[in-house]
Amino acid sequence: MTDMTAGGPAAPKSSLFVQSDNVRRRRQRGAALRYLGMAAITLVLFFLGVLLFSIFSRGLPALFQYQAEIELYYDPAILNADGGAVTAEEVNDVSLRSGFEQGLFTVSLRNTIEDAGIDIEGTVAGVWIDRAVGALDAAGLSGGAEAIAATGAPGDAAQVFGQTGNALRTARTVLADEAATTEDAVAAITAAAEALDAAGFARAADTVGVVADIATEEGLPEAAEALAESNYEQALFDAATALRQPAQFDDGELSAIIYAANRRDVRDRVAANLDLVGETDRVGVPIAISMTRYLSGELTGESQAQMPPGFNESHLALVDRMVEAGIIERNFRWSFFTNVYSQSGEVAGIGPALMGSAYMMLVVLVFSLIFGVAASIYLEEFAPKNRFTDFIEINIANLAAVPSIVFGILGAAILFGLTSLGFGNSIRGTALLGGIVLSLMTLPTIVIATRAALKAVPPSIRDAALGVGASKVQTAFHHTLPLAAPGILTGTIIGIAQALGETAPLLLIGLSVSTGADILSSPFTGGLLEQAQSMPTVVYLFAQNEDAPVREGLAQSAIIVMLLLLFALNILAITLRRRFERRW
Amino acid sequence: MNDMQLTERTVGSTEIKISARGCQVYYGSTHAIKDVDVDINDKTVTAFIGPSGCGKSTFLRCLNRMNDTIDVARVEGDIRLDGEDIYDPKVDVVQLRAKVGMVFQKPNPFPKSIYDNVAYGPRIHGLASNKAELDGIVESSLKRAAIWNEVKDRLDAPGTGLSGGQQQRLCIARAVATSPEVLLMDEPCSALDPIATAQVEELIDELRENFSVVIVTHSMQQAARVSQKTAFFHLGNLVEFGDTGQIFTNPKDPRTESYITGRIG
Ligand SMILES: Nc1ncnc2c1ncn2[C@@H]1O[C@H](COP(=O)(O)OP(=O)(O)OP(=O)(O)O)[C@@H](O)[C@H]1O
Ligand SMILES: [Mg+2]
């Protein structure tokens, strides 16, 4: 200021390089907002990542299925126990469980495995012998393998080890008995040592023999202590228990590995085509679902917690051998997309649910697009602006916020109304009813999006059209609507995507939440009026399943399918949007 | 005002095309046009002048009922086209607007191709029976709007991709394509350079042979150049209406005089 009065060259009032307080504060606020925004986005991305990871890491492996390729032999002896010519009735009378599952599947599985050069008994016995030898070795009973081999069969070895264990137990009891004399004790100990020797454990026999010397020289309590130091007794009993297992491994244990789900199909097939009797067919049979968790590496099988429920090491060993022999293969589970829902994860599928959802989308698209767009055009372009249209507008906005379960109740009310009129049951749980309820739900979304899109069309375009003499309808259909189309499409797709994921209303109007929904027929031949299922309800079912691999695998697989559908819908929306936009 | 060269004052026709009596326009409670009486002659260019916000556009929009599209607007009074009340409930505005075309203050081409912009009116009114005829209408309209040379090679390009001045001429072409009997032009040259302005003025002069043209302008020179009749609006009132020569050389009302000499406005 002084410069200016001095008349010299005027100094700048402020430098561009010095920030004023005002500017600095503004910049700080801007930076804070930017960091806040970045933090928010990071958080969102993090949660999205966690979500997608948990879904894909579980759902993708579940889309692959382990199958045993077995040579299914249609054994005439089972299909027609009394001999003579086989008839369809006879085949249908054969029990599914004892006849088809145990008679055909298990026998064929056994034959397939044995044909592949796998010794089932040997494999199973090997596992338990290893276990027994391990137990013996741990207790210092070396030479267990030879001892078992010397007896011949594992069962015999179990008997010998059991007796030896008993001799040791007797010796221990005698030593603990205060009334026992030294002679009794020495006799019992000697008997135990002899038993050990006879079983093939010479060194252990010597160790026990020393206990007899202690008994005579130092007294019984000292001997008892010395005997307790060796853990032979428990090891022998453990080994005996393990060695008794191979005999337990019967056909039931074998067939537990597979899920003979298609036994019913097989029965129908044989009944329909009796020529099959006596023939052999190559059939892929799913592996039991909890076993797949071992095959996929999810469970290691090394400890009790890592063991697939219902199985033990011998099953795992056998399965390992089957994998080596190429009997078990891992295939993409195409049947998941076509099969019907089932409690059994091995065969459960989302076929009816996919179709049901697709049909409902169709109904939603038709109903809500037609009514939604018509309502919006009317409200936006033709309706007078008065209290009544304001009232409608507010109510549509409110409708968009109504919880979906309320729409379900509305649907149920419609259903009851129709039932009392006499044709409710034909519509209960159908894709048509589901689609109508979802349309009601989607309508407000579409109306709001469409009206916003119509409002966004500059009024000058309407003026231009009206100015050259276009009618209101022509203006709407030639100019406004095409310009609003991208917005309408986006709104519609958002609405449909929302409808696709809706569960609550569907549960209320009886869309199947159990097994029983079948593949639907074409929408033109009444598929819309068949008992339907939907994707979200089937996800719900999977998530409720008692088997962990279904809850934590197939549910995610179904979610992936749903996500892919939504993704496809979005891609469609974007492509259509681009198309329309290029036509400006 | 020396540069104001007045065109020949002979009014093309004394036949009245549009007559307005006691016209009132309200936007809600705003009284935008107050009791205006105007006669617009056939084959004549009538200019509306007046300060901004005085109601020129509003009154112009009454003549083809474009005010109908504004919810709050209410028009009263009697406006007749060839003796027929255009506000009669039996009148279809589509027919009216086919006869009374309009060019808006802000260029508003359709977001379609240049060709479709011009062809739209003839199409919906069924003015062309085949493609060649439609092509002919499009070409002659674009030529009359003095834009043909600039766009003849890109008729398929979007109309919205043109410059502001070109867009305005496209809108003029669109308006003349339907061969209206009356053409309402709301400041058609406000976005044009002097050359294009001259071309549009030439067009207006040409149109006068067949149509009646009403032009709103802020340029006194333009009004003087192209119009035979001039109406001066002020605060919603029609202050003075008469032959252009008389208005510019010998205004009766002091407000008119102060406006054209640049003292109010
Ligand atoms: N849609 C509308 N709603 C409410 N008031 C309006 C509307 N359009 C115009 N008006 C009012 O009517 C009066 C006349 O407006 P109008 O557009 O006719 O003026 P104008 O003479 O054309 O002005 P300009 O030369 O600036 O274009 C103005 O006071 C304006 O505020
Ligand atoms: Mg104006």
Image (cartoon, coloured by chain):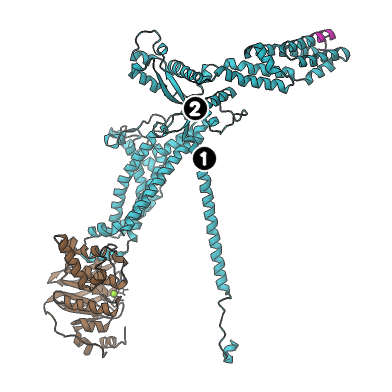
Label 1 sits on a secondary structure element that is helix
Please tell me which residue is depicted at 35% across the width and 32% down the height of the picture. A519
Disc 1 marks a residue whose amino acid type is Ser
In percent of width and height, residue A361 lies at: 35, 42
Magenta span of residues: A177-187
Chain label for disc 1 = A
Residue nearest the viewer, comparing A474 with A288: A288
Chain label for disc 2 = A
In percent of width and height, residue B4 lies at: 24, 87
* Colour displayed for chain B in the image of the structure: brown
Picture layout, residue B149 above or below residue A142: below
> For residue B27, which quarter of the picture?
bottom left
Magenta segment includes B124: no
The residue to which callout 1 is attached is A57
* Colour displayed for chain A in the image of the structure: cyan
Does residue A194 appear left or right of residue B181 in this picture?
A: right
In percent of width and height, residue A523 lies at: 29, 37
Residue nearest the viewer, comparing B123 with A446: B123
Asked if one can make out residue A535 in the rendered structure from this viewpoint, the answer is yes
The residue to which callout 2 is attached is A328
- Closest to the camera, between mark 2 and mark 1, is 2
Quarter of the image where the N terminus of chain A is located? bottom right
